[in-house]
Image: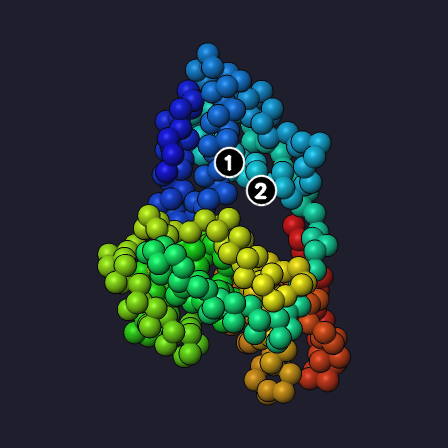
Amino acid sequence: MRKYTSFLAQQIQSYASFQIASGRFGSTWETSLLLFDVHLKTQYPEATELSQEMVDTWCRQRETEINNSCITRVNAIVGLVRYMRKRRKTEVEEPVLPRKERSTYIPHAFTETELENFFRACDDIPNLPKTRIHATRRFIVPVFFRLLYSSGIRTCEARMLRSEDADLSHGILNIRLSKGTDQHYVALHDSMLELMRWYDTAIKEYHPDRIYFFPNKNGSHFSRTWVQEMFRELWDKHNSAYATAYELRHNYAVENINSWTDEGFGFDAKLLYLSKSMGHCNVESTKYYYSLVPGMADILRIHSDGDIVIPEVDYD
């Protein structure tokens, strides 16, 4: 973790350590705190105490910023101010966040051909030049993206998965670092478990004492940029439509919901299991995927007694 250098460095570091211990500290929050620290150091070099102006000037929504982007940037500072207020370290008021906007983005609907093309590209990564980095990339990349596809976990959860949290004896992943605050568990498909066991043996030749299940060349976890760039490089080799790695998570949810149509097991129970596996704080968050499933209204009409009502998703 990079060091903070403003007059508030000690408080920011204390808050960051508190969040890490709570399992609620991700790369987005770390970046926001670092930028806020730079803001304090450059704009208020002689200051010794946090003021309302310092917080408001940083947290104010920018002209080029949509509501949701502002929320993402400011959330960590809201938490910092709240942390300091509870400990009577400041009387500064928490910044007011703008109203969260409903997302209008429609994830890409993968075709079987597109997925076959993508994973073929993952498997055909050349071992040139013959270096340690290229050697490990050849088996890290195919397993990493297949894990996203087969489990529906978030890209950050796969990136920061620790070796100790991958139980390859029972096929269970312990997801500690996630978007939300709740730890959850993911059961691996048998074929994915077999692949991860093979990978675990292969990677140990290069990283025998690795901390992260998917280590980069320095032994740390991969960055978000790495995932984006690697997916784009391989996807574009054989596919023309626009897609992102995160949409493999959407695909997982949609494929699961589609598979329920011809089974007699309770719809509500399956929805609950899916919600827990995907790390949603509540079932309401999972209901978003109804809008991505073709013919969901007809499916419900056929498999229910007519009194099922699915409420609108509460985006707040």
Contact (Cβ within 8 Å) of mark 2 with mark 1 = yes
Q: Hey, which residue is sitting farthest top in the picture? A: 46
Report the residue at 58% width, 20% height from top: 53
Report the residue at 67% width, 37% height from top: 65
Report the residue at 64% width, 29% height from top: 60
| Residue 283 figure quarter | bottom right
* Residue on which disc 2 sits: 72
Looking at this view, is 303 or 251 the one in front?
251
Q: Position of residue 59 (x, y in %)?
A: 60, 30
* Residue on which disc 1 sits: 32
Circle 1: element type: helix
Looking at this view, is 149 or 102 the one in front?
149
Mark on residue 155?
none
Question: Would residue 102 be found to the left or right of residue 257 on screen?
Answer: right
Crowd around label 1: few <14 · some 14–19 · many ≥20 (10 Å): some
Amino acid carrying mark 2 in the image: Thr
Q: Position of residue 303 (x, y in %)?
A: 69, 84
Q: Can residue 277 be seen by looking at this rendering?
A: no
Q: How is the image coloured?
A: rainbow
| Residue 269 figure quarter | bottom right
User: Whole-Å distance between the Cαs marked 2 and 1?
Assistant: 9 Å
Circle 2: element type: helix
Please tell me which of labels 2 and 1 falls first in the chain: 1
Q: Hey, which residue is sitting farthest front in the picture? A: 129
* In the image, residue 147 above or below residue 316: below
Q: Position of residue 23 (x, y in %)?
A: 39, 49
| Residue 7 figure quarter | top left
Question: Would residue 299 be found to the left or right of residue 279 on screen?
Answer: right
Question: Would residue 115 be found to the left or right of residue 290 on screen?
Answer: left
Crowd around label 2: few <14 · some 14–19 · many ≥20 (10 Å): few
Amino acid carrying mark 1 in the image: Ser
Looking at this view, is 271 or 190 the one in front?
190
